[in-house]
Amino acid sequence: MHNQPEIIYDKQGNAHVIVDYNDDYIGAKLGFWLFLFTEMMIFGSMFLIYAFYMFQFSDTFVQYSATLNVKMGGTNTFILLVSALTMGLSLVRLRQGNVEGAKKFIWATIVLALIFLSIKYFEWSAEIHHGIYPGSPTLKSMGDGAVMFFGLYFVITGLHGIHIILGIGAMIWVLGLVRKGKITPTKFVVLENTALYWDLVHLVWVFVFPLFYLIH
């Protein structure tokens, strides 16, 4: 978007700017913001469902919130906040012309995302080991409030985990585009949109953590 526009002239000598719609910065940004809006609708709907059942089973939600591992959840919150910083710094470095520095920060974000998933894996494994997972006999025996709390817990954190995995895939794709020279210090909308997506991922977790881990 920083290059001078290419001009052509018609038979009457009138100048016309050539528009390359394959490199449309404004269109790319607008389209991605619309995508993010649909994502916010999905998670917003899940949070509304949570609020409804929290009102119905408030005591039970508070009771079982205390059974979740706050240290693991808090560690993952810190990891995602740091990853948002590293992802933002990758864009800053690229725009400054430091391509190698940008790649290092993207790799750092990927590593942090993998650590997040690893912690969530161990957390889920401990809960499943105790027989607590959607549809389990143990969970059903704990009552409707527990079923709704842990059902929402697994659905929302699972959906968030899928978005983490998709984010990792997007970052690996971005690294490939950087290597091929398709993302440069003057052509960076793909990286910018990926950073926006990652901001959404960490923002959603900022809501998930207190709703499930801290209400007790």
Image (cartoon, rainbow, N blue to C red):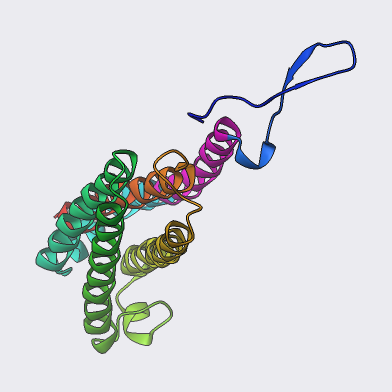
Q: Residue at x 29, y 84 (%)?
A: 128
Q: Position of residue 41 (x, y in %)?
A: 50, 43
Q: Please, what is the dominant secondary structure of the magenta stretch?
A: helix
Residue 59 visible somewhere in the drawing = no
Q: Position of residue 36 (x, y in %)?
A: 49, 43
Q: Is residue 29 magenta?
A: yes
Q: Name the residue nearer the viewer: 5 or 106.
A: 5
Q: Is residue 168 above or below residue 126?
A: above
Q: Position of residue 96 (x, y in %)?
A: 28, 39
Residue furthest to the left: 71
The region drawn magenta spans: 25-48
Q: Residue at x 28, y 65 (%)?
A: 113
Residue furthest to the right: 11
Q: Name the residue nearer the viewer: 165 or 174.
A: 174
Q: Is residue 58 above or below residue 162?
A: above
Q: Is residue 10 above or below residue 212?
A: above
Q: Is residue 120 magenta?
A: no
Horizontal side, residue 62 vs residue 40: left or right: left
Residue 13 visible somewhere in the drawing = yes
Q: Residue at x 43, y 80 (%)?
A: 135
Q: Name the residue nearer the viewer: 195 or 116.
A: 195
Identify the image quadrant of the C terminus.
bottom left
Horizontal side, residue 191 vs residue 101: left or right: right
Q: Residue at x 65, y 27 (%)?
A: 6
Q: Name the residue nearer the viewer: 71 or 78.
A: 78
Disc tally is 0
Q: Position of residue 214 (x, y in %)?
A: 15, 54
